[in-house]
């Protein structure tokens, strides 16, 4: 396996207007995606953020420190080329949303889930017109086809860049409802993350924390917050 990493070769990264939107140039040379597509961005705010990420690189380029760049690359190289597949993948979460699968016990966990998750399902019913049913345990809960169609329409309404953000909000939380609530400012991204981790935090309270699991959760939480930040760069 190679240890090669791309080295910094530029002095300055600059966001600029271009045909179709905005881009980032390194010493006047336009940045391209890993698939060699033009890095054409929908907003100046996103271009500025990406330029700052490139300027922050030191001797070698570390993509792990460039979440906005990674999100834009995903939107252009992956979502744009597989849009229908991405929409179908994300819409499937409506049929298996985390908020719909409740513990059989103990009573404390049952109450905690209900207190936290029922208001979000009520929000989805009232705001999105999508009332999801709740079940106990891990057995599949059948949802109404018209409700799933409504949720699919919600996902399909996002453009490619928003879908890249929503993909992470959904996949990291396990909840389409929470992700949609974040994008509509019905809940903060931090609160959405907390709601998505109720089961895990309950277990920590009972048995104590595990350092490795805590580190893995922090990586996921950071990615979740980064996805929301990426989405915000798309707003007027």
Image (cartoon, rainbow, N blue to C red):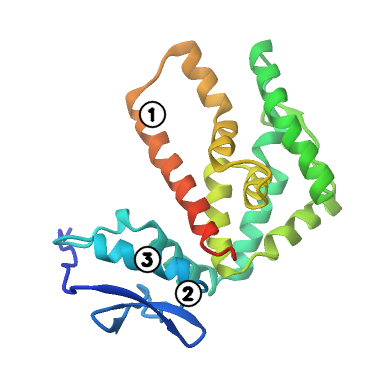
Which residue is labeled 3 in the image?
50
Write the residue at 33% across / 25% down: 211
From the viewer's perspective, is residue 36 above or below residue 60? Answer: below
Label 1 crowding class (10 Å Cα cut-off): few <14, some 14-19, many 20+? few
Left or right of 221, for residue 25: left
Q: Earlier in the sequence, mark 2 or mark 1?
A: 2
What distance separates the C-alpha of mark 2 from that of mark 1? 35 Å
Residue 159 picture location, percent across and down? 62, 69
The label nearer to you, 2 versus 1, is: 2
Q: Secondary structure at mark 3?
A: helix
Residue 99 or residue 189, whichever sits in front = 189
Q: Secondary structure at mark 1?
A: helix
Write the residue at 42% across / 43% down: 222
Q: Are marks 3 and 2 in contact (CB under 8 Å)?
A: yes
Residue 106 seen from this side = no
Q: Secondary structure at mark 2?
A: loop
Tally of numbered tags:
3
Which residue is labeled 1 in the image?
214
What distance separates the C-alpha of mark 3 from that of mark 2? 10 Å
Residue 187 picture location, percent across and down? 64, 41
Left or right of 133, for residue 224: left
Left or right of 218, for residue 80: right
What distance separates the C-alpha of mark 3 from that of mark 1? 29 Å
Residue 90 seen from this side = yes
Residue 164: which disc? none
From the viewer's perspective, is residue 58 above or below residue 38? Answer: above
The quarter of the rendered structure image containing the N terminus is bottom left
Label 2 crowding class (10 Å Cα cut-off): few <14, some 14-19, many 20+? many
Residue 24 or residue 86, whichever sits in front = 24
Which residue is labeled 2 in the image?
41
Q: Earlier in the sequence, mark 3 or mark 2?
A: 2
């Amino acid at each position: 396996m190679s240890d090669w990493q791309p080295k910094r070769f530029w002095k300055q990264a600059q966001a600029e207007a271009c045909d179709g939107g905005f881009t980032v140039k390194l010493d006047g040379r336009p940045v391209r995606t890993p698939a060699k597509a033009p890095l054409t961005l929908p907003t100046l705010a996103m271009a500025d953020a990406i330029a700052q990420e490139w300027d922050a690189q030191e001797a070698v380029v570390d993509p792990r420190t460039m979440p906005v760049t990674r999100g834009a690359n995903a939107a252009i190289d992956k979502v744009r080329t597989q849009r229908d597949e991405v929409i179908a993948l994300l819409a499937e979460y409506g049929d298996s949303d985390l908020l719909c699968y409740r513990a059989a016990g103990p009573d404390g966990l049952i109450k905690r889930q209900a207190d936290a998750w029922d208001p979000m399902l009520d929000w989805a019913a009232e705001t999105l017109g999508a009332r999801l049913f709740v079940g106990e345990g891990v057995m599949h809960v059948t949802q109404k086809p018209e409700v799933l169609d409504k949720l699919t329409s919600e996902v399909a309404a996002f453009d490619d860049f928003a879908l890249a953000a929503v993909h992470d909000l959904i996949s990291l939380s396990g909840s389409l409802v929470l992700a949609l609530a974040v994008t509509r400012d019905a809940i903060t991204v931090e609160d959405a993350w907390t709601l998505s981790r109720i089961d895990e935090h309950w277990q920590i309270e009972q048995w104590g924390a595990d350092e490795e699991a805590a580190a893995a959760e922090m990586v996921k939480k950071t990615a979740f917050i980064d996805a929301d930040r990426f989405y915000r760069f798309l707003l007027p």
